[in-house]
Image (cartoon, rainbow, N blue to C red):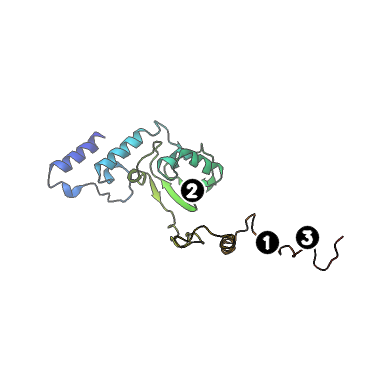
Amino acid sequence: MASQGAQYEGAAGTGDAAPESPEGTDGSGSGDATSPDPKVAAAIAAAEAAGPQGATTVRVDSWIWSVRLVKTRSMGATACRGGHVRVNGERVKPAHGVRVGDEVRLRHEGRERVVVVTRLIRKRVGPSVATQCYIDNSPPPPPREAVAPAGIRDRGAGRPTKRDRREMERLRGVTGPGSVSGPGPVPGKGFGSVPGEPRP
């Protein structure tokens, strides 16, 4: 750590050493020397210091929360229990340990995230530091038009009527408890009566 700090001091102290600022020639994103911002490097060092001491694994629910894939650790544990988290293709429990190089797949909020672990941390970090802890191989998110709600009403139109609600449900293909799935009652007769049959 002292040699890395000296590297930053040497780059700041001399004008000719500035072009050799740590830009990361291999593009791997690992190590403090590849991040050009000293604040990010310090935050990564702090996160790694809070990581497991002498251990090679971290709980998967803690890790996906630490790198900001889910908002809370309990949401990460719930996702694991629901079978939405896979490590190297296998469904895992919240206490499963992840290692550097593992592929973590998470289905959350209608999107699948595919990341490869590059750093083990247990402390939640900022977004700029979180992206240094994994390689993101996720498919691109769907366009905004594809996830827009089906029933968009004009501003100031008020609440939808029952007819509007039924039309919106029909467009979405949703049959709720109040939607009519079959023919309605025959006028003058109750449900279940067949037209043309005499009443008992």
The residue under label 3 is 192
The residue under label 1 is 181
Q: In which quarter of the image is residue 133?
A: top left
| Residue at the limit of the structure toward the top, as seen here | 53
Query: Residue drawn at (52%, 44%), measured in percent from left and top?
Result: 79
Q: Verify CB contact (< 8 Å) between mark 3 and mark 2.
A: no
> Marks 3 and 2, Cα distance to the nearest angstrom?
48 Å
Q: Is residue 184 left or right of residue 100?
A: right
> Marks 1 and 2, Cα distance to the nearest angstrom?
36 Å
Query: Residue drawn at (33%, 43%), measured in percent from left and top?
Result: 129
Q: Residue 156 carries which label?
A: none
Q: Which of marks 3 and 2 is in front?
A: 3
Q: Is residue 160 left or right of residue 118?
A: right
Q: Which of marks 3 and 2 is nearer the N terminus?
A: 2
Query: Residue drawn at (54%, 40%), measured in percent from left and top?
Result: 93
Residue 70 percent across, percent down from the top left: 45, 44
Q: Quadrant of the N terminus?
A: top left
Residue 155 percent across, percent down from the top left: 44, 60
Q: Earlier in the sequence, mark 1 or mark 2?
A: 2
Q: Which of marks 1 and 3 is nearer the N terminus?
A: 1
Q: Which mark is residue 106?
A: 2
Q: Quadrant of residue 30?
A: top left
Q: Which of 40 and 188 is in front in this view?
A: 188
Badge 3 amino acid = Gly
Q: Quadrant of residue 31?
A: top left
The correct choice, above or below, for 29 with respect to 50 in the image is: below
Q: Mark 3 packing: few (<14 Cα in 10 Å), some, or many (20+)? A: few
Badge 1 element? loop
Q: Which of marks 1 and 2 is in front?
A: 1
